[in-house]
Image (cartoon, rainbow, N blue to C red):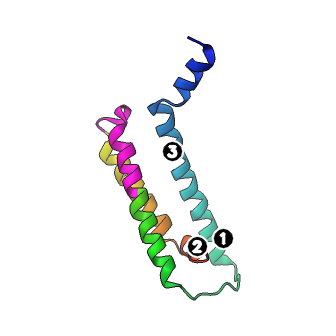
Amino acid sequence: MNPMENLFNYITGDNILFSVVQGLLILFSFLTLLRTLSWKNQNCGWSTRVAKVSTDIRGFLFVGLVIFFTAVCFSTDEIIGHRIFWLTLDVGLLSYILLFNGWGRKRIDKV
């Protein structure tokens, strides 16, 4: 086989892509937490009104991402025996980012 094909097959394997997806979710959660802490310390003067459409968008985004991460967790064989842990972690982080985090709610509400 071609060395580039071997590299491509290795990079797109479940173990690598699962680690990348989980790492991105955890990294985004930490960045959101840091932004929330710095946002609470500043008076940004942002509008506090909330549109009704954005709540629906957050709900659909949450449900869609939970379905995506559930499919990822159940299709990856590398985490057999730890699927409940990863699924709980994913749903918890998504809940924090999209539903309970003030900074994330304000950013999504502006969209």
| SS assignment at label 2 | helix
Residue 64 location (% of width, % of height) = 41, 59
Residue in view at x 57 percent, y 25 percent:
8
Reading the image, the residue beneath label 1 is 38
Marked residue nearer the N-terminal end (2 or 1): 1
The image shows residue 106 at horizontal and vertical percentages of: 58, 76
Magenta: main secondary structure equals helix
Q: Residue 21, labelled with which disc? A: 3
Residue 15: x %, y % from top left: 46, 32
Q: Is residue 95 visible?
A: no
Q: Along the horizontal axis of the image, is 76 left or right of 109?
A: left
What is the span of residues highlighted in magenta in the rendered image? Answer: 66-81
Quarter of the picture containing the C terminus is bottom right
Q: How many labels does the image show?
A: 3
Q: Does the magenta stretch include residue 77?
A: yes
Number of the label disc, if any, that sits on residue 103: 2
Answer whether residue 78 is magenta in the image: yes
The kind of residue tagged 2 is Trp
Q: Do the residues labelled 3 and 1 touch (CB within 8 Å)?
A: no
Give the alpha-carbon distance from disc 3 to disc 1, as whole Å: 26 Å
Taking 43 as reference, is 14 left or right?
Answer: left
Query: x and y percent of residue 81 in the render?
Result: 28, 37
State whether residue 22 is above or below residue 42.
above
